[in-house]
């Protein structure tokens, strides 16, 4: 198994990534095993922030690093929360959580009719071989859905309980883990990344 550091401390993300990467011979370690600092996400796009996070993790550990920057974009909100998805409710609560972010989004969409609640999860995933890697490998994924008016399902994390996948008739939180790991924005981005990594191996 080849060690790689995941530039995230999110347990849900670590489990999801480990499940997807293990069959390819990658042993995924959270950056929190090595250090506690967080990279400054000063980019204006998902790709920029993912590169910043991957370089920071590689620099701190000396290992190859994978980072993703992902979030949910809601059409009626002109793409918000976007790159701020993980800290969307920071202006309203002392301790940001998945629940506080989700509730803020639901509140903002209260007056939006059912036929105008389109959204998509977006993910930019980046691999760097080392901190100064001049050619980061980038994989992108987008998963289309709609925002529900109330939570459904117990699985997943983030905005999954209110992200409705029309063709499956379920929320992302109601999908079996194996199914989500095949079709999610993160799975799409990771598959795009793996194709390029295998090509260069």
Image (cartoon, grey):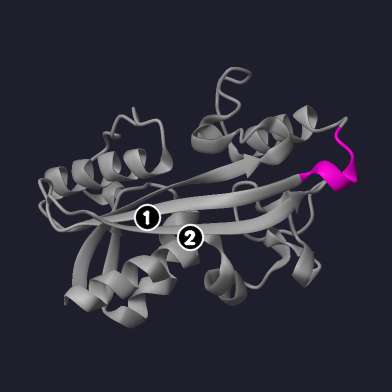
**Residue under label 1:** 125
The image's mark for residue 186 is 2
Category of crowding for the residue at label 1, using alpha-carbon neighbours closer than 10 angstroms: few (below 14), some (14–19), many (at least 20)? many
Q: Position of residue 32 (x, y in %)?
A: 29, 46
The image's mark for residue 101 is none
CB-based contact (under 8 Å), mark 2 and mark 1: yes
116 inside magenta stretch: yes
127 or 97, which is in the foreground? 127
Figure check: 133 above or below 1: above
195 or 64, which is in the foreground? 195
Q: Position of residue 112 (x, y in %)?
A: 85, 34
Q: Tag 2's secondary structure?
A: helix
Q: Residue at x 81, y 48 (%)?
A: 148
The residue segment tinted magenta is: 112-117
Q: Residue at x 27, y 39 (%)?
A: 52
Q: Position of residue 198 (x, y in %)?
A: 25, 77
Task: Please say whether residue 1 is visible from this viewpoint.
Answer: no
Quadrant for the N terminus in the image = bottom left
Relative to 136, 6 lies left or right: right
Q: Residue at x 49, y 59 (%)?
A: 141
């Amino acid at each position: 198994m080849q060690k790689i550091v995941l530039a995230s401390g999110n347990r849900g993300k670590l489990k999801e990534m480990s499940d997807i990467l293990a069959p390819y011979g990658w042993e995924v370690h959270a950056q929190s095993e090595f250090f506690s600092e967080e990279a400054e996400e000063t980019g204006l796009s998902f790709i920029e922030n993912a590169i910043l996070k991957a370089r920071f993790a590689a620099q701190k550990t000396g290992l190859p690093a994978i980072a993703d920057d992902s979030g949910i974009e809601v059409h009626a909100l002109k793409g918000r929360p976007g790159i701020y998805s993980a800290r969307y409710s920071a202006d309203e609560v002392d301790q940001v959580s998945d629940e506080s972010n989700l509730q803020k989004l639901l509140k903002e969409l209260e007056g939006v009719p059912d036929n105008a609640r389109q959204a998509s999860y977006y993910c930019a995933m980046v691999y760097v071989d080392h901190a100064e890697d001049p050619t980061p490998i980038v994989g992108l994924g987008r998963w289309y859905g709609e925002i529900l008016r109330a939570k459904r399902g117990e699985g997943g994390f983030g905005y999954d309980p209110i992200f409705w996948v029309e063709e499956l008739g379920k929320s992302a939180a109601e999908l079996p883990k194996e199914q989500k790991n095949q079709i999610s924005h993160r799975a799409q981005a990771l598959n795009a990344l793996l194709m390029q990594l295998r090509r260069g191996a």
